[in-house]
Amino acid sequence: MFVCKKLHIYNDTRTFVDISFRIRKSLALVGQSGSGKSLTLKALLDLLPRGMRRELEVEWEYPIKRGETLSLVPQNPFTSLSPLTKIKNQFFTSPHHAAELLEMVGLGAEYLERYPPELSGGQQQRVVIAMALAKNPKLLLLDEPTTALDPKLRLSILELFATLQEKLGFLILFVTHDIASAQRLCEEMAVLKSGTIIESGLTQDIVRHPEKEYTKMLIASDFSHRKFRQ
């Protein structure tokens, strides 16, 4: 279990995020653009923009090490991979281990010899997931990793995360604007508004019986409007 007892992100003039949360197995963090979802991930990875500071207090059996105990699957695989570099040269692990990781995400070892533009969007996302698993992370941070995919591919990637979690035992923090995806992947949900968690609990309970008007608005929306995206 990962317990964030305090995460305070601020600068000299304002507070951007002030939250606490618990990840028993999988937690979806949902909210409007600008609510603080991506800042939360950046703070956990110690990647906040210049001028922002953090106070972070956690209870966990592991030290927080970016790329090791914590690993990120970013939103867009197209900007995460170097188009001019073979896949095998973008893994920070041995070729044998890289091949094992690709097999784990449903790709053959032959993909190590390919360049990213030779792969589909779904295949590139699987490569990025394999890279995120290279150091056997204990907590996987997902920054809307299915946004760039069509509905069929989105479902297959969500199923892959669930399968990998059962096999490898990592925790998941899933930042998303997509309530349906949160329902499929995460047992629990926290609703973020203006840097504060206003509602949290079991995902199905929140979706079926939201307490806050803001939460009701998010659930009712089809998220087709840009203002709900981050």
Image (tube, helix red, strand yellow):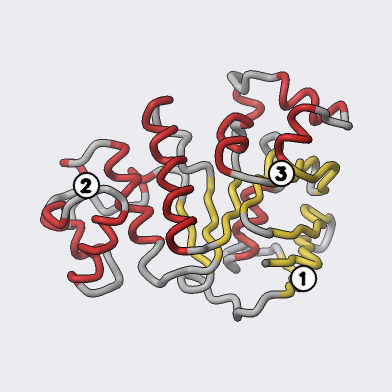
**Horizontal and vertical percent for residue 86?**
16, 57
Q: What kind of residue is marked 1?
A: Glu
Label 1 sits on residue: 55
Image x and y of residue 15, in percent: 82, 56
Q: CA distance from mark 1 to mark 3?
A: 23 Å
The residue drawn where x is 52% and y is 42% is: 144
Q: Is residue 113 above or below residue 226?
A: below
Give the residue number, with chain letter if any, for mark 2.
116
Label 1 to label 2, Cα distance in Å?
A: 38 Å
Q: CA distance from mark 2 to mark 3?
A: 34 Å
Type of residue at label 2? Pro
Amino acid type at mark 3: Met
Which x, y percent locates residue 221? 69, 19
**Mark 3 crowdedness (10 Å alpha carbons): few <14, some 14-19, many ≥20:** many
The quarter of the image holding the N terminus is bottom right
- Is residue 75 depicted above or below 63 in this figure? above
The picture quadrant where one finds residue 204 is: top right
Check if mark 1's residue and mark 2's residue have beta carbons within 8 Å. Answer: no
In this rendering, position of residue 172 left or right of residue 40: left
The reply to whether the C-beta atoms of the residues labelled 2 and 3 are less than 8 Å apart is no
Q: Which mark is residue 132?
A: none
Marked residue nearer the N-terminal end (1 or 2)? 1
Question: Mark 3 or mark 2, which is nearer the start of the sequence?
Answer: 2
Task: Write the residue at 82% across / 28% down.
Answer: 209
Can you tell which quarter of the image residue 82 is in?
Answer: bottom left
